[in-house]
Amino acid sequence: MRTAELAVLERGRRVGLTTASFITEIEGFAPLQEADTARAELVAAIGARADQQGQDTSDAVLSKEQARELLARHTDTLSNRAVAYALSIGDLGLKRALTLSYNEVRYGDAAEDLLHVRALVTRVRELPEAVRTRFRLTPALIQAPASAADAYEQAHETQTTAKTGTRLATLALPELLKRLRAQLELMQRLIAGMRTEPDPRWEELYRAFTDANKTRAAAGAKGLAGSRAATPALLRTLHLHRQDAQPVRLARTNYPLDATVTVENQSGSAFLLWMAQADGAVTTPQTFPAGKVTTVPRAALGPDTARYLTGRFESGAGGEVKVVVRRGA
């Protein structure tokens, strides 16, 4: 994919992360819900086509990571509200049954986590209607983890599907991208038209959508056409978009020490990155300043035996980064 095409795809993905935080507003406005559903389908289709082409994109790995991030966030929210009810009646057994934390879902065994999430959803749905109403366990809030679990499974399928039909993917991309642009424009108009509603959430959604929908040019995008041949081979492209300062495992690979790691930090917060010996372990991180593109040797991130590429934002506000790992020049 060309840089301009990739920028459209990344806009669509960022918007998806934003709309996931405004489920009630979107589901209550049918035209917006339909547009957002179409956006999600187009993003998945374009990601699959790009993966088939074998280009330097965030491909299905990004979709899978985003899906698991949303799964963890939605589950954590649902669990906290449900556990609050259990605590209010002093039922510790129910509390244990309803407890499922962000970290458990985000970093645990995926297959087991999906079972636990669905069990939690079922248990909450079985609570009396009066309890669900009192503790704001709304249908949308309960459905969000279930939908995220389905999305994660679909993203996993997309990642593991054989790369076939390259020619078809190439021919389909222009039309898919055209439709994605149209859906983003439609969503922008729909949300702008609702921002004057009395509910302040619409103004919040408008601001969040506008920020996510911005085109963010990558450094070096205007390089010479012949420069690609001189670029060291790509090993991995990773994206991270979070709204907290929690550490996140980005990859589990022992990259060679002569590889280079480039971080495009599109945030207002510094990003810390390191290679850990064990999942979740902390070593001395490298700091990547806010709003800059910085490249360091893989050796600067940790010992040669470390295999867990881990990072977090310095500020609790989080942000967005793109991490590119390449072979040594």
Image: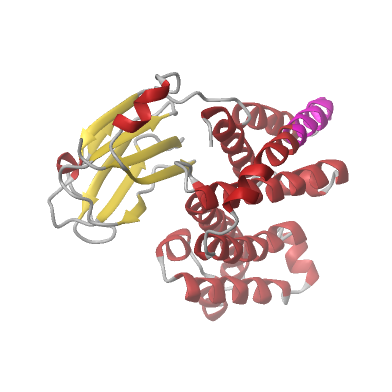
**Residue beneath the point at 65% across and 41% down:** 173
Q: How is the image coloured?
A: secondary structure
Is 186 colored magenta in this rendering? yes
Image location of residue 295, percent across then percent down? 26, 30
Q: Is residue 27 above or below residue 137?
A: above
Q: Residue 197, position in %: x, y?
A: 84, 29
Image position of 148 (left or right of 282):
right
Asked if one can make out residue 290 in the rendered structure from this viewpoint, the answer is no
Q: For the view shown, which residue lies furthest in the bottom direction?
A: 93
| Left or right side of 177 for 73 | left
Quadrant in which residue 39 is drawn:
top right
Which of the image's four quarters has the C terminus? Answer: top left
Residue 126, relative to residue 268: is it above or below?
A: below
Q: Main secondary structure of the magenta part?
A: helix
| The furthest residue to the front | 167
The residue at 67%/71% (across/down) is 124
In-front residue for pair 309/314:
309
Image point (61%, 63%), residue name? 154
Q: Which residues are magenta?
A: 182-197
Q: Is residue 103 left or right of residue 13?
A: left
Residue 315 in the image, given as x and y percentages of width and height: 39, 34
Q: Is residue 150 left or right of residue 110?
A: right
Q: Is residue 319 magenta?
A: no
Residue 287, visible in the rendered structure:
yes
Q: Position of residue 122 (x, y in %)?
A: 67, 76
